Amino acid sequence: MSLFEARAKPPVKMTYRGVGSSIGQYEFMGEENPAGAYVSYNDFGSGDMPFSTEDRQTLLDNGVTVLHVPFNLGAMSFFHNVPDSTLPSTGLNLDACIIADIFNAVITTWDHDDIMAINPDFSPPSGQPIVVYHRTHGSSTTKGITQYLAAACPEKWTQVGSTIEWPDVTVAVEGSGEMSSMIDATEYSIGYIDSGHGRDDGLSEVELKNLYGTYQSSAEAIAQGGVQAAAEEAIALGVLPTDPSADFNNVSLHNMPGQYTWPIVAVSYLYVNQNQLDSGSKGPLLYAFIKYILSEDGQALLGDYNFEAAPADMLDISRAALDMMDLPLASDSSPKWTFESNTTKGGGQEDYVISAKRRSWFEYELGEIESEMATADDLATLEATVDELAALVRSSGLIAL
C-alpha cells in the first residue's frame, strides 16, 4: 500500500489493520453495522482461511457475492524449546500422530516411548513435562494445524476449526507474537506459528514428517519447492475451485503428496465484494491494487515477508476475479488506473498512473538502510571467517603473518 501511495501522482490514502482472519471476516460481513445490515466495515479483507459455507450463503442471501482471491502461500510449523544439548544432530523428529497426542495431552513427557522411537539419540531428562501452547480466539493458524492433524492422523485428531476445545493442562496465548515469546521463554515447550515468523524469531522448528515419509523443516522444504508443490497438487486434485465466487470452505493444501512437499500450507486470500458499482473512486483503485499483487512485480515482494508466490495455475484463478468485479464506468470520480514499469514518455506523468519511476523519501531511505544493513552483515561474516582462520592457524602451530 505504501508503494501505491508513493507511486501515484494524485494523493492516495490506503490503510490496512493487522487483525486476525476471524475479525477480518466479521468486519467484511458487517452484520452489526448496524444490526442486520450486512454493510462491510472495510473495502476488502484478507485472511488465511476462506469463508465458511454458512457465512458465504448468509452474504449471498443479503445481496453480497464474496470473491476469494488467493494470492500467496505460507508454511505453518510446530516450534519447540528443547535444549540443543539433548537433541539428536538431525533435530527433533515428530509426526502428525505424536503431535496429536501431545496436543490432546495423551503424551505429556518428552521421554515418551513414541517420541524416543523416532529420536533414538534424544536425551531429555526423565519424566520431563511437555508445556503445550495454543492460540486463543479465532486463529487461522489454529484452523490450519487442526486441518492438518485431522487429515494426517484422523484416528487421533477429530477437531477442526479456528477455535476448538483444548485440554485444561495446555496453555492459551493471544496472537502470534505471544506464542513466539512464550515458546522462547519456556524450556521444553511446544507450540505452532507461521514458519517465517518462528524462524525470524530464532525458534527451533520440529522436523515434521510429510505424507511421503520425509522428515524436514519448512526451510528445507521451501528450498526444494515444497510449499508451491502443495498448491500444485491441490489444483491437480481439484481441491481449489476455479470460480472465485464459489464455495472455498473445503479448500485445504495440507498433507499433500510429494517427497519434499510441506504438509501444512496456508493460502492467503483477499476477500472482495463483487459489486463495486457504488464504490466511487475506491473500486477502481482496489482493482488496480489486486492486479498489482497478482503481477510478477507484486509476487516478487512476497519473499521479503517469508511468504511464497502462488503458482501460475493459482494466479489464473485469482485473475479471473478481476474480470468478475463489477466496476463503475470510468469517470473523473471513478478513474481507471494504469501502471508504468518502464519509462513511458508523457504517459507516465498522467494523473492515474502507478509509476515505478516515482518514489517517496521514506521508500528511498528504507532502501538505503537495507543496503547498509546488508553491508554490515557481510562485514560481520567476513570478520567471523578471519577469526576462525586465525584460530585454526594458532591451533595448528603455524605462524600467522
Image (tube, rainbow, N blue to C red):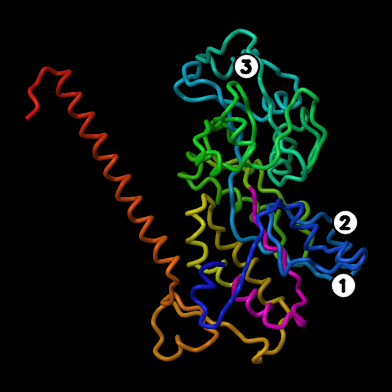
Report x, y in % for residue 324: 71, 76
Camera-side residue of 273 and 12: 12
Q: Amino acid at mark 1?
A: Gly
Magenta-drawn stretch contains 282: yes
Tag 2 residue: 54
The reply, left or right, for residue 105 in relation to residue 319 is right
The label on residue 63 is: 1
Give the structural element (helix, strand or loop) at label 1: loop
Report x, y in % for residue 145: 69, 39
Q: Which residues are magenta?
A: 266-289
Residue 180, quarter of picture: top right
Query: Farthest residue toward the right?
Result: 36
Residue 175, quarter of picture: top right
The label on residue 249 is: none
Estimate how packed mark 1 is, as few (under 14), some (14 to 19) or many (20 or more) residues with alpha carbons within 10 Å. Answer: few
Quadrant where the image shows the C terminus:
top left
The reply, left or right, for residue 88 in relation to residue 60 is left
Report x, y in % for residue 117: 59, 15
Tag 3 residue: 110
Camera-side residue of 358 and 125: 358
